[in-house]
Image (cartoon, rainbow, N blue to C red):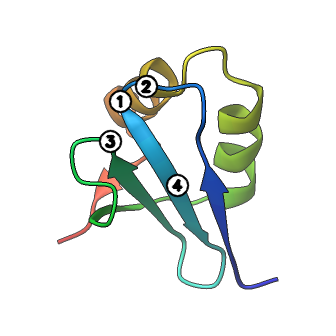
Amino acid sequence: MNSEILEVENSSAISKISLNYEENIVGIAYTSNPEMFYDFFCDDVISVRDKLKSAESMGKCVSQLRKEGTLQNVK
């Protein structure tokens, strides 16, 4: 399994999330533009996937992961 797309149904902010396990990239597509992914580098994509799948609020979880530095902007 090289990559996976999580379709987000219960969020007003996040449309879908792309997980690229080979390149350690998490892509976030917001509901305002669901075809545009914003990519973030992540050391442990599997851990992020597990946190996102168990989160009550996808938007809050993504925000927290960015604040703590788990998801870092791709340069």
**Gap between marks 1 and 2 measured at Cα:** 6 Å
Q: Quadrant of residue 67?
A: top left
Where does residue 24 sit, x and y in percent of width and height? 54, 72
The residue shown at (77%, 26%) is 54
Where does residue 1 sit, x and y in percent of width and height? 82, 83
Q: Which residue is mark 1?
A: 13
Instruction: Tell me the kind of residue under disc 4.
Output: Ile
Q: Earlier in the sequence, mark 1 or mark 2?
A: 1
Q: Please, what secondary structure does the residue beneath circle 3 have?
A: loop
**Gap between marks 1 and 3 measured at Cα:** 5 Å
**Gap between marks 1 and 4 measured at Cα:** 12 Å
Q: Which residue is mark 3?
A: 31
> Do the numbered discs 2 and 4 sit on residues whose CB atoms are within 8 Å?
no
Instruction: Tell me the kind of residue under disc 2.
Output: Gly
Of badges 1 and 2, the one in the foreground is: 1
Instruction: Tell me the kind of residue under disc 3.
Output: Thr
Q: Quadrant of residue 18?
A: bottom right
Q: Earlier in the sequence, mark 4 or mark 3?
A: 4
> Do the numbered discs 3 and 2 sit on residues whose CB atoms are within 8 Å?
no
> Do the numbered discs 1 and 3 sit on residues whose CB atoms are within 8 Å?
yes
